[in-house]
Image (cartoon, rainbow, N blue to C red):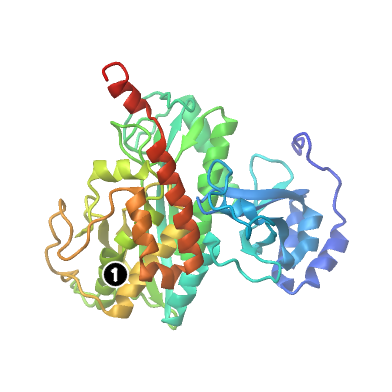
Amino acid sequence: MTPPAPAGVLLRSPDWGKLMAVAVTDAAAAPMARAAEFLRAHDIRTVRAEWCDLHGVARGKRVRADHLLESGAGGVSFSSASIEMDLRGEIPWLDEAHLPWPNLYARPDPSTLRLVAFEPHTAAVTCDVVDGAGEPVGFSPRQVLRRVLAEAEARGFACFVGAELEFYLFRDAQFSLLPPGKLAYRIRNSPQEQEVVEAISRGLCDAALDCESIHAEDGPGQFEIVIRYGPALHVADAIFIARNMTKEVACRAGLVATFLPKPLPNESGSGFHIHQSLRHRGDNAPAFCYHGDSIRACPTLERFLAGQLAYTPDLTALLLPTINAYKRAATRRIRMNWGVDDRSASFRVLLRSEGFSLEHRVPGADANPYLFIAAALAAGLEGIDRQLETIPVIPGDPPDGDGDAPGARPLPTSLLRAVAMLRGSDVARRWLGDALVEKFAALKQDEAERFARAFTDWERREYLEYL
């Protein structure tokens, strides 16, 4: 039996014959035709056209299926204000040039079309942001990652990543804990936790995302989503979808899911790790390879790692993008160091059956997935371009886990300092674009300055009665 549609959802069946005809006359005929067939096969009436803002938050419109297909490659219009807003819905840099807020367009990527498990007759599609001429908006996060991947392709590489993303479940926004307490890899969860975890798993499955597992982490109510290794853009899309789906599913269950890196002062923080590797585009052979029966130094990996050690400090604002993220970084004593299968290091070299991979363990769970992956790959590719050297990757003893690698600069310890380093980074501007650097830096500088002016609960407890 088909479940009833929620109130307010249009139940008029589209004229699929007409829409298929519209779809196949579009410039992107084959993908749009497949999209039309998908919508018809699943009796989809409403499509959530979603795009990513600078924070990594999903914004979008619910549109009729027929309207989405009729719009075709032109996309669904929306106000350009929404992609530049802070989390309060305000624009820090209002000026005369911005006041008209011209339309931008959410151009659907048919390859991301998916079912929405908790909304009958509803699908969702991830969109690229384009202007009125159909040109990509350079500072939109998905386009920033596309830009870096195109540069990698020009160098003969295809980029692959896998991802691990941690989050907490709470009873409410006051961080009230759920039972049974903290126990990594626990199988027994509270009924509320289990309901949410199973709903997230079903949602990811219905969305055809490659989720390997969802398992309990060390903190009370803390879990981790593991996304299968694959092409970098595909994995970034999956993380974007999974993170926003997790918050939505928890809300529907009356709980709060948060990807804040340090929501509890005395418990584990929530991180966001990616496993990176490169393949040669010609023959798909691993670029982080080893030879024979022994593990020997791989120059491409060494230079890629050296680039991440050298340039991650410049890009930290994209990896630790909130005030809260620096609390996790301070607690974990995150340093610019590396190790072989060493979880205490920021960069962890692992041997897979097809060669090496490099785990990047710096970011908090609040990092925008497109911007984090773009920044990480850019730093590594810059290292390859410059043929940077570090101490030999294999063999050789990694540096002390409590300090920075020899010659490496330390990470900035505050959001304001990280923003200044991002603004002054030639690497960030060349790889990610001036528009992204300026808009992201302005947004985060305003956030840091507003926090500096705020009167906090800590100040109230520490000073109010005594001074």
Measured as percent of width and height from the top left, residue 327 is found at: 31, 41
In the picture, measured across the screen, residue 268 lies left or right of residue 22, that is left
Q: Quadrant of the N terminus?
A: top right
Classify mark 1: helix, strand or loop. Answer: helix
Measured as percent of width and height from the top left, residue 365 is found at: 40, 46
Say which of 254 and 53 sits in front: 53
Q: Measured along the vertical axis of the image, is residue 275 above or below residue 333?
A: below
Q: Measured along the vertical axis of the image, is residue 451 above or below residue 279?
A: above
Residue 315 shows in the view: no
Say which of 52 and 111 sits in front: 52
Q: Which residue type carries mark 1?
A: Gly
Residue farthest along the top direction in this orientation: 465
Using the rendered view, name the quadrant where residue 386 is placed: bottom left
Please give the name of the residue rendered at 63% of the width and 53% of the height, measured from the top-left corner.
81
Crowding near the residue tagged with mark 1, few <14, some 14–19, many ≥20 C-alpha atoms within 10 Å: many
In the picture, measured across the screen, residue 230 lies left or right of residue 66, that is left
Q: Measured along the vertical axis of the image, is residue 288 above or below residue 422?
A: below
Q: Measured along the vertical axis of the image, is residue 80 above or below residue 311?
A: above
Please give the name of the residue rendered at 45% of the width and 81% of the height, measured from the top-left corner.
154
Total numbered circles = 1
Residue 343 shows in the view: yes
Measured as percent of width and height from the top left, residue 71 is found at: 77, 62
Please give the name of the residue rendered at 31% of the width and 59% of the height, measured from the top-left corner.
359
Measured as percent of width and height from the top left, residue 219 is found at: 33, 34
Residue farthest along the bottom direction in this orientation: 282
Say which of 191 and 396 sits in front: 396
Using the rendered view, name the quadrant where residue 176 is placed: top left
Q: Quadrant of the C terminus?
A: top left
Say which of 441 and 356 sits in front: 441
Q: Which residue is mark 1?
A: 307
